[in-house]
Amino acid sequence: MGITLKHIVMWKLKEHAEGADKSTNALKLKALLDSCAALVPGILQFNAVIAQDGLEATCDVILNAEFASREALDAYQNHPTHVAIKPFVGAVREARQCFDYES
């Protein structure tokens, strides 16, 4: 098997944004991310997860994805469906961390 590209993104959400509370926006963000799970060829793994009550977490939503190549990640990043969710994400996030690496 060749080298794959891991793409991990973590968001801390605002307490209130876009007329909703953090919990509601986390669910909506997860649903929007889930809608991107099969947008382009080369997505090998795609998991959006919301922090669970009672477990330690310093962020509210995580995307843990794996792509077959940098080209596949670039195609995902530029796909119209992915681009369309960015305004919502920008409006509800307090902070964002991203970590890409080859494995």
Image: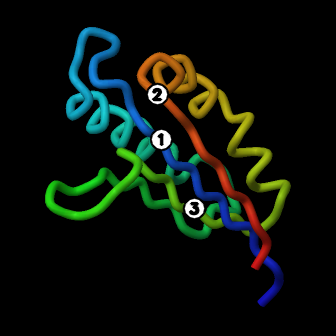
Residue underneath mark 1: 11
Residue underneath mark 2: 93
Residue underneath mark 3: 65
Q: CA distance from mark 2 to mark 3?
A: 19 Å
**Which residue is more in the foreground, 89 or 38?**
89
Label 2 Cα neighbours within 10 Å, binned few <14 / some 14-19 / many ≥20: many
Secondary element under disc 2, as helix, strand or loop, is: strand
> With respect to residue 50, does 15 lie above or below?
above
Position of residue 6 in the picture relative to residue 52 (left or right) = right
- The spot of residue 41 in percent (x, y) is 68, 58
Mark 3: which amino acid? Answer: Ala
Secondary element under disc 3, as helix, strand or loop, is: strand
Q: How many marks?
A: 3
Mark 2: which amino acid? Answer: Arg
Q: Disc 2 or disc 3, which is closer to the eye?
A: 2
Mark closer to the chain start, 2 or 1: 1
Q: Are marks 1 and 3 in contact (CB under 8 Å)?
A: no
Q: Which mark is residue 42?
A: none
Q: CA distance from mark 1 to mark 3?
A: 14 Å
Label 3 Cα neighbours within 10 Å, binned few <14 / some 14-19 / many ≥20: some
- Residue at 46% x, 27% y is 93
Secondary element under disc 1, as helix, strand or loop, is: strand
- The spot of residue 58 in percent (x, y) is 39, 52
On the image, which quarter does residue 82 sit in? top right
Q: Disc 1 or disc 3, which is closer to the eye?
A: 1
Q: Are marks 2 and 1 in contact (CB under 8 Å)?
A: yes
